[in-house]
Image (cartoon, helix red, strand yellow):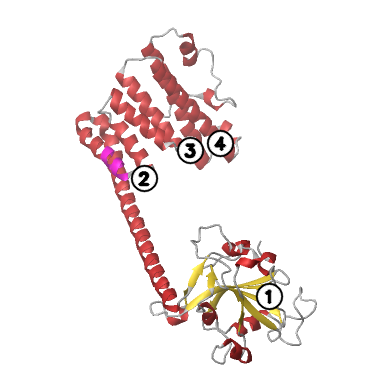
Amino acid sequence: MSDDRADVPALFLNRVEEVPPDSALAHVLRDEETPEERAELARDRGNAFFRAAMRVARQTREAPADEAVKELTPVERQDRVQALLRQAAEWYTQGLEVGCAERAVNAALYVNRATVHIQRGNYGRALQDARRCLERWDDAYVKAYQRAAYAAMQLSRYAEAMRWCEAGLALAPGRGAAAGSDAQALQTLREQIQQRQRAEQQRQQRMYDARWRTQQEQRRLLAALQERGVRIGAPLFAQQRRYPTTMPRWAVDDGDDGASSLLWPLLVVYPEHDQSDYLEAVHEATSLHEVLQWLLPPPGAPALPWDRADLYRPDQVCAWYATQWTRTADDTDTFVGSTLPPDAIGEWRPVPLEPHQATDAGSGGSGWSLGALLRQPDYTVPLFPVLLIAPIPCPPRPGWLLAHRS
């Protein structure tokens, strides 16, 4: 099949299946030959289509030499290559189906069809054909071992590919000069397989190391949460799962190895207006009043677009959370806390934001930090912290969670 000097003008017609009436196809269709002759004719015809495909493929990569190819766009050339390869495979299949008993012809048909499958990227079928050649017709056909090894390599079955290579190389010295080029191809292929094996082993090692580091980090993070008394539960709102960051991470300012404080994503919800703000990284030592200063306009600045009454300023709002507003669950659970009825979410708790609020809440004379909120024994973190904000003196309403449940 490597000889491309054959004259195959009919293969460059617009319809590649058209052939002259006196061609080999006419003889095959009249069934006037023996099965062996028909198989050989089918093999030769398949070879002609394959050579034509390779000829067009080369002219797809290089400057076209054939006028018929020059007229085709690059996409049309690729389509023509695939059409020619399909025709080649069909001819090899016909040759295998005529009932030929000649072992060499059948072996060549299987190997040639395997070659077509390789060109088309059908490596599983190529491996199957190469194995059939060796198992049914010629177990010493070096080219079949080369095709099997290459297909197995492309399927990332490196150990199997190496076995095919070694078996073919063991046979090559006894097959004469004709097997020399195949043996050389197997030698080159063996080196490629070894390179891919090493690359795959390195990739697997990197994946293992990454998983190990992730597991170690998760254990360390879990220990930090347990030490802080933080409980993680199911999300409060379905939208929480759509945010880019949903878990705490170590603060890089503490150093990669010695980090001891955490950065949390934070969802601030304004339930009276069905609005929210998402912050991706808030240090656990940050005061919640400072967070509101980031989000809400200071006195004298324009109000938020949705705050027509101009009630949302850092010193004019209060913060709340509810006990039992969610439940402990795996992240894969579809439960969200906002599906609970209002009478099932427990009690609403105020969150001290400033020193004058802290006295009533018993927080030691200062507004809460994010970490202080998370450490409350009745606060279950709904996937990541959520804080509800309303203007003073707005009390909690039963439908607050339902209003922002989407």
| SS at mark 3 in the image | helix
Q: Quadrant of residue 282?
A: bottom right
| Stretch of the chain drawn in magenta | 158-164
46 is higher (above) or lower (below) than 386: above
The C terminus sits in image quarter: bottom right
State the residue position of label 3: 58
- Outermost top residue: 32
Question: Callout 4 environment at 10 Å: few (<14), some (14 to 19), or many (20+)?
Answer: some
C-alpha gap between disc 4 and disc 2: 29 Å
Q: What amino acid type should be assigned to the residue bearing mark 2? A: Ser
C-alpha gap between disc 2 and disc 1: 60 Å
325 is higher (above) or lower (below) than 52: below
| Disc sitting over residue 56 in the figure | none
Looking at the image, tell me whether mark 4 or mark 2 is earlier in sequence order: 4
State the residue position of label 1: 396
State the residue position of label 4: 77
Residue drawn at (55%, 88%) of the image? 363
Counting from the top left corner in percent of width and height, residue 342 is at: 65, 66
258 is higher (above) or lower (below) than 399: below
| Disc sitting over residue 156 in the figure | 2
Question: Callout 1 environment at 10 Å: few (<14), some (14 to 19), or many (20+)?
Answer: many
Residue drawn at (35%, 43%) of the image? 153
Q: What amino acid type should be assigned to the residue bearing mark 1? A: Pro
| SS at mark 4 in the image | helix
| SS at mark 2 in the image | loop
